[in-house]
Amino acid sequence: MLFNSIEFAFFLPIVFLIYWAIGYAHIKNTLKLRLQNAFVVIASYVFYGWWDWRFLLLIAFTSFCSWGSGLLIGRATSQNKAKAWTAANIVINLAILAIFKYYDFFVSEFGQLFGISTDSLLLRIILPVGISFYTFQALSYSIDVYRKKIEPTKDIIAFFAFIAFFPQLVAGPIERATNLLPQFLSNRKFCHDQGVDGMRQILWGLFKKIVVADNCAAYVDQVWSTYDTQTGSTLLLAAILFTFQIYGDFSGYSDIAIGTAKLFGIKLMRNFNNPYFSRDIAEFWRRWHISLTTWFRDYVYIPLGGSRVSKWKIVRNTFVIFLLSGFWHGANWTFIAWGAYHALLFLPLILLGQNRKYTNQVAEGRLLPTLKETLQILVTFGLAVLGWIIFRAPSIGQAWEYISGLGTTSLFTMPMMIGGLKRTLFFTVIMLIVEWFDREHEHAFCLSQLPQWVRYIAIYILILCMLEFAGNSQSFIYFQF
């Protein structure tokens, strides 16, 4: 079920009303909590099963294995036994991920390498939506139990709710058990202010997805389908618009997920923090897909030694996490190349100890950035645009052809103009302006400093814009991961 679908528009209020009807029922708190959590599991499985009910068995199996491993780790009589149970759950989860997401890729590449036919060996299995997200969430639980960061829970219903919580089930944020699971183990009360804030965040997320990302997609898709005949200026404009498309699409999903969770008294971690206002590539990665980057930092980079090792090991660790991050996105060499590209950009900063130079918001306490900050933002943005070309391309060869097309004299001509382009650029600029002025808040479109009548006008305008473009909505990009 898509957030930007008519089905979800009916699904959400129904689930909301039943959920809080249970929450305020005159029954014992322990029973009330279990019923609420059970309802969350049911609603989440309906949400996920709307796409393909057969894969509900897979998420249930993943949940059960991870819940059981937590109990076994907690009861282990020695460190070696605890480590064995942790390793077993990691192997099970990664094996499932490998079979569904990577098996056909490796078999095909093996066949091409040795010039043999592998068609009979291919599984041709549909990739389950969100498998990379909920698998990583399940993995983090058993690892955190092993590290004694969280006590294993005996409450299987609460655990299933933690893994399958529908707002963030298929595209994150990738939650940690230390943050989300305790919220399902304690009673929740509806907070009006939190609910209103959640609705604003949902509205802003839908605007970024339906109005910005989907309109950008129309131009981007048309250019990519004929990129070998396009001018350099058209290729550049399409690359920039894809940069905003993927941001509006993915951060829009995260805003909707976080805002929806607030309606149920649940607080999810922030997943985006104005990444295109970053002053270097290290700051960009602290602000882009935060739940994934911190996951790799905590469960891969730091265990490998982090930055407290020799220089060559720092280089190794940096490349490991970026290559894994790229490969996490899908079975294609372009994702690996994209990860390697960012590792190369990141490496000088980490070797020089400059990777933590910018941890605050740009122009903090000021209306506008300085000239230096503006140039830093533009350079970092340009590097990100180049990376997104590699990410968007179907193959390494096509990425190279596209980038090569930017180096022609046609770069200085007028780009291709299609219907709706000016409108797309206008809404993209509006998105950037709103996010710039709200960059020091928890999320954009807070409207907390504006008079009430201005807030209402802004909300009505956003709703009208979304209704105008609702018929052209597309699936979220990160559903494929």
Image: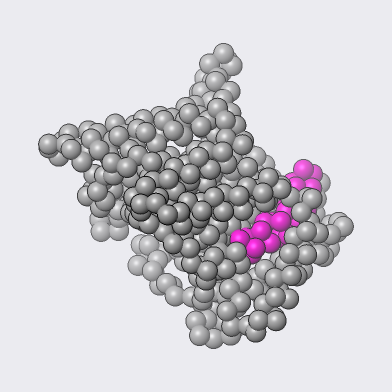
Q: Nearer the viewer, residue 164 or 188?
A: 188
In this view, the residue farthest toward the top is: 120
Q: Nearer the viewer, residue 451 or 219?
A: 451
Figure disc tally: 0
Q: Main secondary structure of the magenta part?
A: helix
Task: Tell me the quarter of the image containing the C terminus.
Answer: top right
Q: Report the residue at 63% width, 83% height from top.
A: 450
Q: Is residue 196 above or below residue 218?
A: below
The answer to if 76 sits in the magenta stretch is no
Task: Tell me the quarter of the image containing the N terminus.
Answer: top right
Q: Nearer the viewer, residue 179 or 113?
A: 179
* For residue 411, side relative to residue 76 (left or right): right
Q: x, y percentage for residue 181? A: 36, 51
Q: Report the residue at 59% width, 16% height from top.
A: 119
Magenta region, residue range = 202-226
* For residue 442, side relative to residue 200 (left or right): left
Q: x, y percentage for residue 30? A: 34, 50
Q: Report the residue at 51% width, 53% height from top.
A: 21
The reply to whether residue 178 is in sight is yes
Q: Is residue 456 above or below residue 397?
A: below
The reply to whether residue 288 is in sight is no
In this view, the residue farthest toward the left is: 77
Q: x, y percentage for residue 356? A: 38, 69
Q: Nearer the viewer, residue 294 or 469?
A: 469
Q: x, y percentage for residue 268? A: 45, 58
The answer to if 208 sits in the magenta stretch is yes
* For residue 126, side relative to residue 135 (left or right): right
Q: Report the residue at 72% width, 67% height from top.
A: 462
